[in-house]
Image: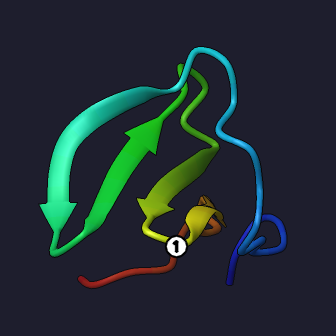
Amino acid sequence: MLNAVYDGDVPMPDGARDTGYRLGDRRLWLTDDKSTAYVRTPDGVEAWPRVKDGVGCK
């Protein structure tokens, strides 16, 4: 479960920084609050919200 809705077309926020992580032509960017991950693609920017606590591999 996500804490917010995924958005596949957003502007890159001011203050976002490139993390250096890459997957093909996708690049991961974060802001200081880390509540949303931004993925720059050839088509624009996607906003991926943080997952709720307790979700993930154990």
x, y percentage for residue 56?
38, 81
At x 46%, y 36%, the residue is 30
At x 83%, y 73%, the residue is 5
Could you tell me the amino acid type at mark 1? Gly
Q: Is residue 13 above or below residue 45?
A: above
Left or right: 22 in relation to 49? left
| Colouring of the image | rainbow
Q: Is residue 43 above or below residue 1?
A: above
x, y percentage for residue 26?
31, 66
x, y percentage for residue 13?
69, 30
At x 64%, y 67%, the residue is 52
Q: Secondary structure at mark 1?
A: loop
x, y percentage for residue 11?
74, 44
Instruction: Check the picture and name the quadrant holding the C terminus.
Output: bottom left
* Farthest front residue in view: 42
Residue at the spot of label 1: 54
Instruction: Check the picture and name the quadrant holding the N terminus.
Output: bottom right
Q: Quadrant of residue 46?
A: bottom right
